[in-house]
Image (cartoon, rainbow, N blue to C red):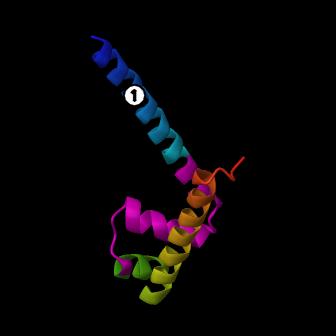
Amino acid sequence: ICIYLYDLGTEDTQENDEDERINRIMMIINTLPPKTRKVLEECYFNQKKYSEVAQMLNIRTNTVKKHIMKALSSLREELSVSVNGKDS
């Protein structure tokens, strides 16, 4: 029984940590420039191909790739800062 209760506490903590991570990611995404955010959302959340997003936004496929690289770089940088305890 003690192990079971311990596991429940660990699971709640893991869920809270996951919720916090998701909230942090969404906050970072919301700070991206509008077009970068739109490209990221279309490619990752709506699972569209780069070529589809390029056509939809009337931009080149390479521009879509640059927006994705910029978005992922920002996410990595901001998440790295919060993991290293430098985030307030």
Q: Residue at x 53, y 41 (%)?
A: 20
Tell me residue 12's x, y (percent). Answer: 42, 27
Crowdedness near tag 1: few (<14), some (14–19) or many (≥20) residues, C-alpha within 10 Å: few
On screen, residue 84 versus residue 43, left or right, reads: right
Camera-side residue of 41 and 84: 84
**Is the stretch drawn in magenta largely helix, strand or loop?**
helix
Which amino acid type corresponds to the residue marked 1 in the rendered image? Thr
Q: Residue 32 lies in what quarter of the image?
A: bottom right
- Give the extent of the magenta segment: 24-50
Note whether 21 is above or below 80 in the view shown.
Answer: above
Residue under circle 1?
10
Camera-side residue of 52 and 88: 88
On screen, residue 76 versus residue 44, left or right, reads: right
Note whether 3 is above or below 77 in the view shown.
Answer: above
Residue 58 makes an appearance in the image = no
Tell me residue 4's x, y (percent). Answer: 28, 17
Q: Residue at x 50, y 69 (%)?
A: 72
Camera-side residue of 76 and 41: 76
Note whether 72 is above or below 81 in the view shown.
Answer: below
